[in-house]
Image (cartoon, rainbow, N blue to C red):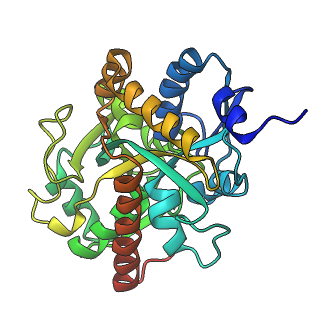
Amino acid sequence: MLATPALAQANWPDRPIRWIINFPPGGAADILSRILAEHFGARFGQPIVVENRPGAGGMVGADIVAKARGDAHTVMISSASSHGIGPVLYRSVPYDPLADFTHVHLVGSFPSVLAVNGSSPIQDFAGFMAAARPGGMTYATGGNGTMNHLVGQLLKQEGRVELTHVPYRGSAAAMTDVMAGQVPAVMESLPTAMGHFRGGRLKPIAQSEEARDSTLPEVPTFRELGLPGVTSSNWFGFSIASGVPAAVVERWEGAMKEALAAPMVQQRFAAIGVRPGTLGPAAYTALITSELDRWRQVIRANNIQAD
């Protein structure tokens, strides 16, 4: 006898949940996903199977979820890269960032941070610009189409300095080469780089949000440094495929609100400079829509292309 949809929803989740991380291990998406997966595994009584499926600025993993229409057991951490930038940066995108997903909740936001090797003679942003202006400078990121890639391009345009983007397959590889002296600078997400900042292996010199993050009170914003056009927040959210029953979406929304209010999650987020999100389905979807519009205009105005 087949289960009715109502019964299936009541029994959900009735098997392990597949959690797609669309970036490599060690990046912000991976860190946040594993914090939340630990919470949800205990909450739902089902294993959370975390699966890293990186590529194309997060679009490879996002496409897996997009093609899982109606599957309430396949979820992902959506991001500015996969849902706000990639779909308007790349010519060929295999999914619709709005129609192919049910966007459940904003998970968190944080700045992109410009940093140099901890032993670099560059001491601050003024020193960075002085070093870059004669002949240009390269900067590493965790990949094409990421927020960090675009923030670097905004700095290139507004700062009128030649910056060459060096994309890596993940943040860990990018930071490793900067710490090894192979690349002079990196634009990186705060949660990913925090440990290296605290250990002195990387030196943060500017951050991208309107105000200084509380974990980096000594590091000025680009706006403070006279470059207001380089202002941007990096964000991650929680999304599932389209076609999932509304009752399941509501359960996910309630569970995510509970998770983001849990002391353990809040403490771990605070330790890496992440502000927990407060936007539910409608507001988070509206954020993605506005980000698509913003980055489409920025990309066209500045002729930014995927490397």
Q: Quadrant of residue 307?
A: bottom right
Q: Nearer the viewer, residue 197 or 77?
A: 77
Residue 125 in the image: state x and y as whole percent. Answer: 18, 53
Q: Residue at x 37, y 15 (%)?
A: 264
Q: Quadrant of the N terminus?
A: top right
Report the residue that reaches farthest toward the right.
1
Location of residue 255 with respect to 204 vertically, above or below: above
- Residue drawn at x 24%, y 64% is 230
Q: What residue is at 62 percent from the left and 60 percent from the top?
A: 56
Q: Is residue 31 left or right of residue 233?
A: right
Instruction: Say whether residue 228 is visible.
Output: yes
Is residue 290 depicted above or below 40 in this figure? Answer: below
Residue at (14%, 56%) from the top-left corner?
A: 126
Q: Is residue 172 above or below residue 156?
A: above
Give percent across and percent down for residue 261.
32, 25
Badge count: 0
Frontmost residue, 244 versus 219:
244
Which image quarter: residue 299? bottom left
Q: Position of residue 16 (x, y in %)?
A: 72, 26
In the foreground, 246 or 165:
246
Q: Nearer the viewer, residue 154 or 209?
A: 209
Decide if residue 238 is on the left or right side of residue 13: left
Q: Position of residue 281 (x, y in %)?
A: 42, 50
Q: Is residue 27 visible?
A: no
